Image (cartoon, coloured by chain):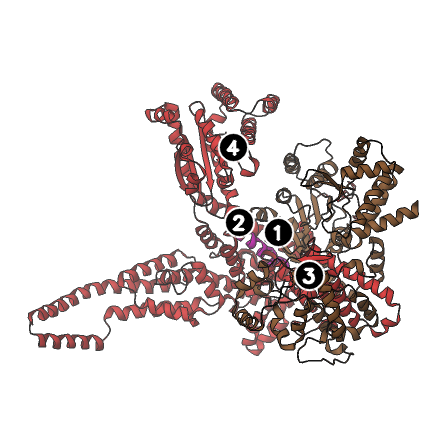
Chain colours: A brown, B red
Amino acid sequence: MGNGTSVSGGEVYSFQTPKRSSKMAELASELAHTPEQSVAPDHSKGPGKTAKTPQSSKHSSSNKEQLRSKKKEFVSTTPYRLRKRLAAPDSYLESESEYSASCSEEEDEEDQQEVSTVLSGQKTPAKTKAAPTPPPRNSLAKKNKEEKMSNLMEEYFEAHSSSKVLTSDRTLQKLRKRRLNQETLRDLLTKAPLAYAAEIKELNQQHESLFSKWMLQLHLGFNIVLYGLGSKRDLLEKFRTSLLQDSVHLVVNGYFPSITVRSILNSITEEVLDHIGTFRSPLDQLEFITKRFKEDSSLELYVLIHNLDSQMLRGERSQQILAQLSSLPSIYLIASIDHINAPLMWDQAKLSLYNWLWYETTTFSPYVEETSYENSLLVQQSGSLALSSLTHVLRSLTPNARGIFRLLAQYQLEKKDNPSYPGLSFQDFYQQCREAFLVNSDLTLRAQLTEFRDHKLIRTKRGADGVEYLLIPVDDSTLTDFLENQDEDA
Amino acid sequence: MSTCSVSKGCFVFKPSAKKRKLSQSTAHDFGIRNDDSEDTELRFVTCQSLWNQIKSETEKVQEDLNKQLLDNLMNFLSRFHSEFQEKTAEWTCRMKFREIPTAALVLGVNVTDHELTFKSVSDFLQNNITPYIALLEAKDCPGVKNLMQKLMGQLMNCYVDVDSLEDEDYVQVSQNRIRCSMSSLIKWYESVTKKTDSEAPSKKRTTSAHWQSPPVVVIFKDMESFTTKVLQDFIVICSQHIHELPLVLIFGIATSPMIIHRLLPHSVSSLLCIELFQSLSCKDHLSTIIDKLLLTAQFPFKLGEKVLQVLINIFLYHDFSVQNFIKGFQLCIVEHFYSQPLSVLCCQLVDLQKRVHSLSHDQCENIRRLPSFRRYVEEQESGKQVALLTTDNFLKEEIQKLLEDLHVYHENYVSILRCLHVFTSSLPKYPLGKQIRELHCACLENQVWETEEYESSLQLARMLNKSDLVTMLQQCMEILLSSSGKEFDKTVEKLKKFLTEFQNLEAEAFQEQDVSISSQKELQKKTDLYHLQKTLLELKESRRTKKLTKFEMLRFEVVDYIDSLVRKYLVPADRRTLHEILYFNTAAVLRGHLNAAPRTALHTALNNPHWYLKNQALKCDGGSISNKAPDICIVYKLHLECGRLINLVDWLEAFSTVVMAGEEPNADTASSDQMDDIIHARFIRAVSELELLGFIKPSKQKTDHVARLTWGGC
């Protein structure tokens, strides 16, 4: 066991180099056709590796084809001039590191594509901005030469200087399957078999053989921190159930979104020490705990923290308090960390308080619990939580209030094509509401809006002219769904 | 009870009082892994007693090292105190300028060790000078008000400690109610000193140790982290009251004394009467620790070369913390006794015989399995070989002899090492290192006399001048005389002989000098250029061909003798039989636990899952990754190809391309719709896992994009 010592620091912490987005698709097709797998004949056209991508991925799956053709309509690619240049094989290879706005699948049907790209190039000015017009060919070559000579430093600045990001414009909205809510996701994942279960189990057994050693080291005054890929929750649970059944212990789910140091300290004082009363500050509370543990030497407490590096606990003050807590001789801390930068939380002083022994426990188990609390990416993708909360709140409101919100939502959807839509100004909104017989004075409207704001249903913003603008901070698709749902309800 | 909940993050488990084990024995944990239960108990006890010995030894070292500092501090305080009591002219003068006596303790950058120093300082002051000590830390004092609160809290609490608990109520009240101001502090001080003064004759308790009207000492543990405003205000306020309250400040400084002037403007720093105290540097501290823990025959447990190197590297390149070094040492002891069943024999010589004789058959087998012992057996003649491998009793006797040898070897090793160090530490450019620990590592690593550095240092030693050589020989003799090894009588005699020969040389050299002077005189006589040239050439010629002087011959002899000693005694420990029992040499474990590289582990797991999951399908030649790898590895590998932003749709598509290719071909006959959903779900999971690991974060720059947070490979 143990991580590969062959990995050098340069490999782990090297500079980011600018890369083309199509590279991902290229790699994907490469991976898809590792030798023993290759079924699709690889008839590459042209000298470079340029044409491979679309060919192979097309052959690999039949249903991908329709997916792609569907996508064609909205794919927007580089301007025509650039496209043409890229189509010429050698200049394409030359410019590899500089232009990256192209998508993966345009090479096969060149003629059609060219037409469509001209159109899309004209239609979306934003895209043209993203892909700089290419310099004349000779300066390109010169630039290329310079590139070769460039050292790491230049690479760094190159990667970080330009604010333009060259990626395709496709969005999940346009995909057929765009929405998976938490439950269906969970269902689907439980249906999918866990890969390499046997190996993972073996890995876990190796870690489990260390339990008694952990126990010994905890008792000798060390604290234990687990790192490595994979959820360490089950491992710690197993440790808890197998060795800690007969002793007082506290389990802290660091990944829980509203965990605080305060709540950890509270559960120690209230539940472990049976103390009733409150404290002025966490420091006072810590002092109390320290005193109690020093007075009564028979008191012992095992603390298990899943994800000590979570969003809520990684703050300096929280870590300081936890470190001080863990430095008490009769409190035994065993924690897990996952974030790649987690060790940066601790300075020398905290490290010496924690007195860590590091254990590598790579488990490869999926982070089921840790990522289950409405992770931002999921919400962004599905928006289901936002939708359900919208409907939920709206249901508890009066019909008039619902009407007011509807008005605002409809207006916002009408203006969804206007990227600089600031929101609906209060006066206009009042006018509209009056016309719909929803309110009779601007005071009632304001009262209603305050309620919306309290539920975070709307956001107000003052424009440059001092006018108040109202906006629903929800993306358009969710809003559409919401209105549809409302119609059904009504 | 489950620990998953959507409303709660902390779960306390309290077993019923009956079930709860009252004192869980640590020894119990020690034994779970091993079957030979009779030894584990003993091993654990040995381990604990050894560690306790070592701990007390380190504490003693620490104390000794601090002694100088504490004495100086004591003098400093007593000087000001006597001035304050007698109200001398100097004191009145100082009062006129309102200067606060201040000690600046320069402690060095190893912040983690400071805690111990401060503890010993405050204990020392508490026991000898004054009960009124307040230790302040920057993080508790964001403002002057908090500082005063903290200060008064600590001072009044210590008052309780001194004056027993009878009037605790009074203090409790006062602490809560009194406004935290300087005047209330002064009032408190007056009342307290008056009380102890009046009490002193009747109950001779506190005054015996403490001085009359003891000073109030305020220690700023980390001076650099205090906000300047707080410090300035506090100093100005104190200086206003210095004639009523004998206040002394102590600054703990990690960087350089210059920081005082950088933090405080002249108007404030002129209110301080600063004296500088330098604590011992952490490097010296480490040398002493190594000297007392490793280069001694006191403890049976020893560190192997690699382990020592790891500990020293952590010290030199990471933290300069002696505390951490000792922690590492502790871990070594625990590891050794936990993982090596034969460590039961790692004990003092007195206990050895009993323990060897009580060895079980299994343990004997363990010994026969040791590589160093097998090497030893192979060297013996066949009859003895059989006896060693079959008869336990014979083996035990042999073991005892060998272990005794090993102890003797170590004793001799240390003495000769010190002698060699006397020589090498004075050579130019220090080919074998300046510190004895470097020499120690070099000797443990391999046969030192085969290294180039040793060769060059011998050559340099052959050029030493006489006086140096003589003093070195004398030092060596002292070292050998003081060592407990019995073998050194002859060596000492030999060295003595060398010394007398050097003395004889001196007399001879005196005569020789006469000769050379006369020849020089001759030279001066000749004024003719041709003749001069000729004689010079002759002289040069003679010097070249000249036989070595007696001194040079003797020098060669000395160096050769030292060389022979080195070859005899400084054999690396891992060449010795049964070294596994006394020497801990598993450096990888130590490095893994103390100096872990979490990011490297992640990198390996993501790039090369085969390292962990021993499945043939995952085996791939370097760089690439199989399409059957775990989802997160594939997603990770794909994201490496992207720039700062990643389009989720592209990513998803690339992912499904890879995964579809990896699936069994019959999958496409099943409903592709469901397949798609599952892949989508797996993708979402992998992406949110990457987010948890900190490789990406959601981005608002573009819809459905995530931002990459890492550069390059990981």
- Mark 1 crowdedness (10 Å alpha carbons): few <14, some 14-19, many ≥20: many
Q: CA distance from mark 4 to mark 1?
A: 30 Å
Q: Which residue is mark 1?
A: A356
Residue wearing tag 4: B134
Amino acid type, mark 1 = Trp
Assess whether residue B331 is covered by the magenta stretch.
Answer: yes
Q: Identify the chain of the residue marked 3, using the numbered disc in the image.
A: A
Check disc 2 and report its element: helix, strand or loop: helix
Tell me residue B212's x, y (percent): 44, 25
Label 3: state its secondary structure: helix
Q: Are marks 2 and 4 on the same chain?
A: yes
Q: Chain of mark 1?
A: A
Tell me the distance, in whole angstroms, between the alpha carbons under discs 3 and 4. Answer: 66 Å
Residue assigned mark 3:
A127
Nearer to me, A471 or B6: A471
Which of label 2 and label 4 is nearer to you? 4
